[in-house]
């Protein structure tokens, strides 16, 4: 396992996407009902790089969330995130056998596999586009426009819309994506595979 797996996870996954992946229903303002204590009104706020519950005081980052949610050590939690989201940061080591919450009992195994892999792919691509939009943004009208900046502008909207349907949507909406444009995540996966490891990693200053 790489020594900076904790930072790599922060760099490659939005915290809001991660907590949704593990079952939290986060509203557009970033609030959810806290999974660490019983409450009727959301007091669990998810920020870009950390969360804080104004009800019970729980506070932490990506790894802290999974660590507390599943009762793991921080290393086990990091390995689980890497394994569940397909980040490949654990050098092939297996995460502990706890299934991702996004997968619910259904009969269509092909659809389940597609859904799981699509979420993995689009979470990483969304983060990468956010980074490209920031780092390659032309500083003046005379600057040459980088192809990756154009890709971020052209692809980010649909990628975020599609990912929201998979994370937020009900089964009908998820299946609509599957029936209408199931190849989109596959095209994105091919695009990511074309990029080397350095190009795919969004440094820690990317928001």
Image (cartoon, helix red, strand yellow):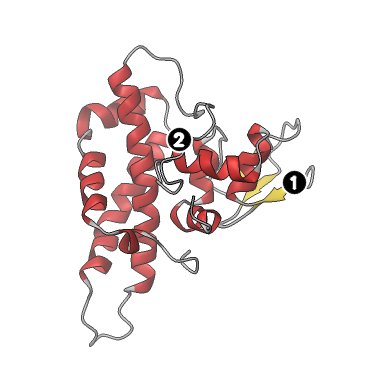
Which percent across, then down, holds residue 201?
38, 60
Q: Are marks 1 and 2 in contact (CB under 8 Å)?
A: no
Q: Is residue 23 left or right of residue 114?
A: right
Q: Is residue 64 above or below residue 128?
A: above
Examine the rendering and report whether any part of residue 132 can be seen. Answer: yes
Residue positioned most to the top: 107
Which percent across, then down, holds residue 24?
57, 35
Q: Is residue 27 left or right of residue 36?
A: left
The front one of 205 and 34 is 205
Which one is in front in this view, the residue at disc 1 or the one at disc 2?
A: 1
Using the image, tell me which numbered label, if any, was put on residue 168.
2
Residue at x 38% of width, y 50% of height: 124
For the residue carrying disc 2, how many other residues have a C-alpha within 10 Å: few (<14), some (14-19), or many (20+)? Answer: some
Local secondary structure at mark 2: helix
The front one of 149 and 71 is 71
Which percent across, then down, holds residue 161?
35, 44
For the residue carrying disc 1, how many other residues have a C-alpha within 10 Å: few (<14), some (14-19), or many (20+)? Answer: some
Using the image, tell me which numbered label, if any, was put on residue 3.
none
Q: Is residue 64 left or right of residue 193?
A: right
Examine the rendering and report whether any part of residue 52 can be seen. Answer: no
Query: For residue 131, what is the image quadrant?
Result: bottom left
The front one of 189 and 146 is 189
Tally the marks: 2
Q: Is residue 131 above or below residue 140?
A: above
Residue positioned most to the right: 56
Q: Is residue 201 left or right of residue 44?
A: left
Residue at x 53% of width, y 50% of height: 15
Q: Is residue 102 above or below residue 134?
A: above
Inter-mark Cα distance, 1 to 2: 24 Å
Residue at x 48% of width, y 57% of height: 8
- Residue under label 1, please give it: 58
């Amino acid at each position: 396992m790489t020594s900076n797996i904790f930072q790599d996870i922060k760099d490659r996954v939005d915290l809001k996407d991660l907590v949704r992946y593990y079952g939290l229903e986060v509203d557009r303002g970033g609030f959810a009902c806290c999974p660490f204590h019983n409450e009727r009104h959301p007091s669990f706020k998810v920020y870009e790089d950390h969360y804080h519950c104004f009800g019970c005081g729980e506070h932490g980052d990506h790894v802290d969330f999974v660590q507390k949610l599943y009762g793991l050590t921080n290393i086990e939690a990091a390995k689980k995130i890497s394994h569940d989201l397909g980040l490949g940061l654990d050098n092939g080591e297996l995460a502990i056998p706890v299934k991702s919450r996004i997968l619910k009992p259904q009969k269509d195994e092909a659809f389940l596999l597609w859904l799981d892999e699509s979420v993995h792919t689009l979470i990483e691509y969304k983060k990468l586009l956010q980074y490209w939009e920031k780092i390659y943004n032309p500083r003046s009208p005379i600057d040459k426009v980088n192809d990756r900046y154009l890709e971020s502008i052209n692809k980010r909207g649909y990628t975020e819309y599609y990912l929201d349907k998979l994370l937020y949507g009900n089964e009908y909406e998820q299946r609509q994506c599957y029936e209408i444009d199931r190849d989109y995540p596959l095209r994105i996966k091919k695009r990511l595979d074309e990029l080397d490891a350095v190009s795919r990693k969004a440094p820690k200053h990317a928001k």
